[in-house]
Amino acid sequence: MSIESGPFSPFVREKKRLAGGFTLIELLVVLVVVGVLVATIQLNLFSDNARRLRNEGERLAALLTALADETVTSGRPLAVSFSANGYAFWEKEAGKDDVWRSRPGDELFSDRPLPNGIRIVELRIRQRSIPLSVKDPERVAFSPSGIHSPFSVLLALDDLRVRVVSDALGNLRVEDDVGEGPDS
């Protein structure tokens, strides 16, 4: 029996390979292509606007967490107020219980306008809807004890919504809001 016609001949090996299915390399190439397609679809599902809005909600939640921490460490009440286009941070004047002033010379807690197109459409304190005002704003006050009124702020960009929610203990979270907003 010659090598050409035996079980180890190149012709027999070629027939076995063709009849046996796909090679590992071929399967890996298909998996890579499917992975790229899934990643592309996933990126397109989360649009740039949704990402921008979510990032702004996360930024607001981080700032409010820092404000609550600053209130506890400084021992002074601090507050935040909201308007349709942004938010501002406040501190109580020394010796005056009901007089609030804007935080002077504070880079972290200075007045902040919202990025282009993003707006605040609703403020709720203790589940009560609060009008948004620049002249006489309702403030969410943070106590040095670490306890404050539960509140939520609804941010919108086009038809997208995210809600920044805080419970009485200052636990903040950002949620996608799929309900009907006041201007939906």
Image: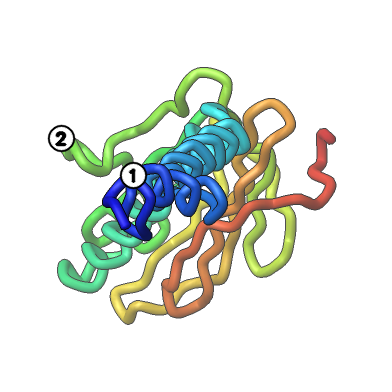
| Neighbour tally class for label 2: few under 14, some 14-19, many 20 plus, Cα within 10 Å | few
> What is the three-letter code of the residue carrying label 2?
Gly
Residue under the image location 52 percent in, 27 percent down = 48
**Disc assigned to residue 150:** none
Of residues 144 and 183, the one drawn nearer to the viewer in this rendering: 183
Residue, x 76% and y 50% (percent of image)? 178
Q: Secondary structure at mark 2?
A: loop
The amino acid pointed to by label 1 is: Pro
Crowding at dot 1, Cα within 10 Å, few <14 / some 14-19 / many 20+, comes out as few
Residue toward you, 77 or 175: 175
Q: CA distance from mark 2 to mark 1?
A: 82 Å
Q: Residue furthest front?
A: 1
| Residue 128 appearing in the image | yes
Q: Position of residue 9 (x, y in %)?
A: 33, 49
Where residue 106 appears, x then y in whole percent?
17, 39
Which residue has dot 1 on it?
10
Q: Secondary structure at mark 1?
A: helix
Q: Residue 105: which disc?
A: 2
Q: Quadrant of residue 76?
A: bottom left
Residue occupying image coordinates x 35% and y 56%: 6
Specify whether 75 is left or right of 54: left
Residue 175 in the image: state x and y as whole percent.
Answer: 59, 57
Residue 56: image quadrant is top left
Say if 25 sits above or below 61 in the image.
Answer: above
Left or right: 119 with respect to 6? right
| Of the image marks 2 and 1, the number of the one nearer the N terminus | 1
Task: Classify 137 as above or below 143.
Answer: above
Which residue is depicted at the point 42% across and 78% down?
147
Q: Quadrant of the N terminus?
A: bottom left
Task: In this rendered view, identify the residue nearer to me: 86 or 132.
Answer: 86
Q: Is residue 83 in view?
A: no
